[in-house]
Image: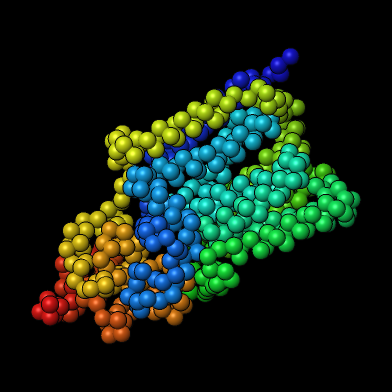
Amino acid sequence: MKQPGEVPRDWSPILVFSFFLCLWTGLAVAGREVFFSDPGVFWHVVVGENTIRSGHATAIDPFSFTPPSQKWLDTHWLANILMAMAHRIGGLDGLLQVTSLVVAWFFTMIYQRYLRQGVHPLLALLLVGLSVTAVAYHIHPRPHLATILLQGLTWGLIVDLETRQKPRAWSWLLLPIFILWTNLHGGVVGGIATWILCLAGWLAWYQFGQRSPLTSGRDAAMFTGIGLLSCLCVLVNPFGVQWFDPWLAVINSPVVPLLIDEHRPLWVFPSKFILILVLAFVYILALVGTWPVWPKVSWLLPLVWLPLAILRVRHSPLFAVTAIISLQTMIPHVRWLSWLANRGSVVCRLVPRAPASSRNPFFEIILPLGLTAGCLGLLVAEVHIPVFGRGSARLDPGRWPVELLPELQQRQNGVAGGTPIFNSMYFAGFLIYFTPGYRVSIDDRCELYGDTRLLEYAVTEDKNPAELEEFRAAFPFDLALVQRKSLLNAYLGNSANWQKIRQDAAGVLYQRSDSQARH
């Protein structure tokens, strides 16, 4: 007999499809401008195109004039190629749709995990929706997104190994995942560290006689071997051990957090901090509610990511995805949820898990795949349809100097090998993408410029803009593109040495007063 509030088995596939469709549409609408608010989006595409054309990963800086031909390793080479391929499908619209589709598929799989656990659809929607909200400000078409998604996929596999939803042999899949991840983004270090910590916990639980995926010494030896091989996966890349150099340069830099928001502490941004705190509160409340059940190792690992998330913004989505996946296996053991269910709460009641034979592949797989292929087909055919076709992506004129493009494009080829231009760091990606004839003064590849150069720029931008002249003496340039609301704009506007060419809502373009006479 069907219990009160139980969702019929046939509804689950429809709910999964509805979740996918709503999330995809919401991301495609909300991301039209927001997805392109990060300057790295633009230069990653250009690097990917360069790699496709040249046939090898970039090892020399192709964009800066300070100084030119400096060593720079494109450790995100595979992610950049994938971005370039999405861009070839439909330009910025292609990046918008591919990002929306991939993220929608990812969180739909998590939502599906909850439904198969027997969690009520409304409770599953609330919890997964909270995770989506906590991750939302990191959803941009760039390599870091690969780390967020692969952290979730890796952690889902680890959790399934622990709960024996997957056989132990599936643990070998982690090795190709880590190799792929290594060539997509440096966040693989965090993924491997999480896996190693989980292995250590499983070994400890095994020694203490607690429930663990390890049931014998042979299992312990196999998993230990997989753990050691996992650490070697990061060496499978075009640069060998040099792969670590840019990663260590950014992580260890005391200057990067002064310039890049993602490397600052989370509490600097109250709205983002509150979202993570809410998710952390829900997670810890659920974890405490499982007492006196001995905790699984996967229930404790998100607590390792929580302080890391608070100390550095870019780690917060990694806490969010590990927490929401671990919470799914925790729910059946949360006593206060059982207490509410016994007192009539339909939402807190677990329903019997539907057998695999009752699942509907049409709604869960075929229809979403068909919509995905249809959307990409519209982009390739250059069909203009709101939200899903061409013309959906747009740049916020309050962020990007789009109205200055005619003047910028007119002056970009004044010097063989690239015209040097002084630029606000935020505008570098925009210049690299839209005006490839320039060589920029700085961009957000912090490992390239080093702490000394980054600190000099920070001082010039925020404290003493007159130091721009000293920089010009070392690296000559006659053009400057700065943010409208900046000390640099105030300085250049009052300087007799610089002439304002044009300004818009985002930026101001200046030219050296004596440069026209020289040319």
Q: Position of residue 127 (x, y in %)?
A: 60, 39
- Quarter of the image for residue 235 reads bottom right
Please determine whether, in this image, residue 404 is positioned above or below residue 100.
Answer: below
Q: Position of residue 423 (x, y in %)?
A: 30, 69
Q: Residue at x 48, y 55 (%)?
A: 79
Q: Residue at x 75, y 32 (%)?
A: 339
The reply, left or right, for residue 493 in relation to residue 317 is: left
Question: Which sits in the foreground, 326 or 165?
Answer: 165
The reply, left or right, for residue 180 in relation to residue 467 is: right
Q: Residue at x 73, y 40 (%)?
A: 166
* Colouring scheme, one of rainbow, by chain, secondary structure, one colour: rainbow
Residue most extreme to the front:
55
Question: Which sits in the foreground, 112 or 244?
Answer: 244
Quadrant of the snapshot with the C terminus? bottom left
Q: Is residue 178 visible?
A: yes
The reply, left or right, for residue 426 in relation to residue 282 is: left
Q: Is residue 304 visible?
A: no
- Count of picture labels: 0
Please determine whether, in this image, residue 106 is positioned above or below residue 189.
Answer: above
Q: Position of residue 226 (x, y in %)?
A: 73, 56
Q: Residue at x 47, y 69 (%)?
A: 73
Quadrant of the snapshot with the N terminus? top right
The reply, left or right, for residue 255 in relation to residue 311 is: left
Question: Which sits in the foreground, 485 or 372?
Answer: 372
Please determine whether, in this image, residue 76 is positioned above or below residue 390.
Answer: below
Q: Position of residue 280 (x, y in %)?
A: 63, 50
Residue most extreme to the left:
517
